[in-house]
Amino acid sequence: MTIENLGFFREFPHGDAQGPSLLECVAKGDVRIQGSIAEYLEGGALLAATAQRVLDVLSEEEWDCAHKMQHFTSRRLY
């Protein structure tokens, strides 16, 4: 069995400097299913929230986490 690290993109403060780039992974894959993926993510439950503003490492904008999550999901997939 092999254990693989996932989610440690180099752009994150907790990321791996030698890890994959999140910027290079955006909107990759089959464009025919991107809409379905966005719908799936938008239909999910919020797992964690913070009252603190968070940095979007892709656009370098600050967000109010829960308020902007749906917009963020759709914007990144298209």
Image: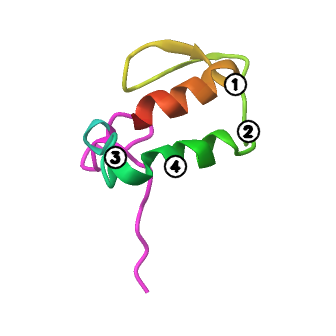
Q: What residue does disc 4 label?
A: 37
State the separation of the CA atoms marked 1 and 4.
19 Å
Q: Hey, which residue is sitting farthest front in the picture? A: 32
In the image, what residue type sits under mark 4?
Answer: Ile
In the image, what residue type sits under mark 2?
Answer: Leu
In the image, what residue type sits under mark 1?
Answer: Ala
What is the x, y in percent for residue 25?
Answer: 31, 45
State the separation of the CA atoms marked 1 and 2.
8 Å
Q: Main secondary structure of the magenta part?
A: loop
Residue 1 or 56: which is nearer the viewer? 56
State the separation of the CA atoms marked 2 and 4.
16 Å
Quarter in which the C terminus is drawn:
top left
| Sooner in the amino-acid sequence: mark 3 or mark 1 | 3
Q: Secondary structure at mark 1?
A: helix
Start and end of the magenta stretch? Answer: 1-22
Q: Is residue 59 visible?
A: yes
Quarter in which the N terminus is drawn:
bottom left
Label 4 or label 3, whichever lies nearer to me, is: 4
In the image, what residue type sits under mark 3?
Answer: Asp
State the separation of the CA atoms marked 4 and 3.
26 Å
| Sooner in the amino-acid sequence: mark 1 or mark 2 | 2
Say whether residue 49 is left or right of residue 14. right
What is the x, y in percent for residue 12?
Answer: 41, 35
Label 1 or label 4, whichever lies nearer to me, is: 4
Q: Secondary structure at mark 2?
A: loop
Quarter of the image holding residue 52?
top right
| Sooner in the amino-acid sequence: mark 2 or mark 4 | 4
Q: What residue does disc 3 label?
A: 16
Q: What residue does disc 1 label?
A: 66
Mark 4 residue crowding within 10 angstroms, few (<14) / some (14–19) / many (20+): some
Tell me, yes or no, whether the two marked residues, 1 and 2, touch with CB atoms within 8 Å: yes
Say whether residue 77 is left or right of residue 27. right
